[in-house]
Amino acid sequence: MGILFGVLLTVNTNAQKSPINLDNVVTPSKFKISAGAGTANYYGDLMEKNGIFTQTSYSLSIGTFYSFTNKLAARLDVGMQKLQGADSKKGGAHKDRNLSFKSNVFDFAISGEYTIFDLDKFSLSPYISAGVGVMLFKPYALDVSGYKQYL
């Protein structure tokens, strides 16, 4: 069982911004871009029960956000993580078993988001989000000769 953990730092930027409209008021962009970096961790039989962060790898993401109205928006997100697990890092009775794997994980998601409160009037708001996503991965291990063997 693989679980991804991550603390993402998100930076929003304006893709296009019109400095002045007819009322001489700054108009916010409908497009926003986000990027994130964090950690990915495998949790399963190839690790110690208390060592959840002993085989940590990277997690990266990038996305875009388009606001149709003040409350309705669409998101498109792409991510890449690396998962790994190895008996050699676990120790104990399973070390002789010598099982291991590595896998790059790619994910793609598109979703809609409805914000309950108008963010022009409130600093925070609960929201409802629904969408679909696809995850691709191909785990492998290295054989005694150093060649990749896909699992």
Image (cartoon, grey):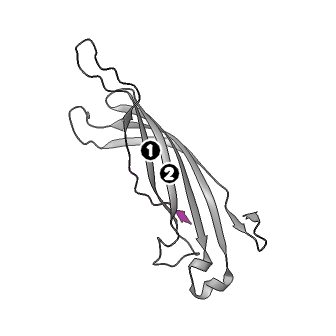
Tell me residue 121's x, y (percent): 20, 33
Which disc, if any, is residue 60? 2
Amino acid type of the residue tagged 2 in the rendering: Leu
Residue 69 drawn in magenta: no
What is the magenta segment's predominant secondary structure? loop
Q: Residue furthest top?
A: 22
- For residue 138, side relative to residue 131 (left or right): right
Residue 125: name its quadrant: top left
- Which mark is first along the chain, 2 or 1? 1
Question: As rendered, which of 101 and 116 lies closer to the eye?
Answer: 101
Query: For mark 1, what is the residue?
Result: 35
Which disc, if any, is residue 95? none
The answer to whether 101 is drawn above or below residue 49 in the figure is: above
- Image quadrant where one finds the C terminus: bottom right
- Image quadrant where one finds the N terminus: bottom right
Q: Give how far apart the Cα atoms at labels 1 and 2 are.
A: 8 Å
Amino acid type of the residue tagged 1 in the rendering: Ala
Whether label 1 touches label 2, CB < 8 Å: yes
Q: Residue furthest right?
A: 145
What are the residue bounds of the magenta stretch? 1-11
- For residue 2, side relative to residue 139 (left or right): left
Classify 10 Å Cα crowding around label 1: few (below 14), some (14-19), many (20 and above): some
Residue 112: name its quadrant: top left
Q: Residue at x 38, y 46 (%)?
A: 10
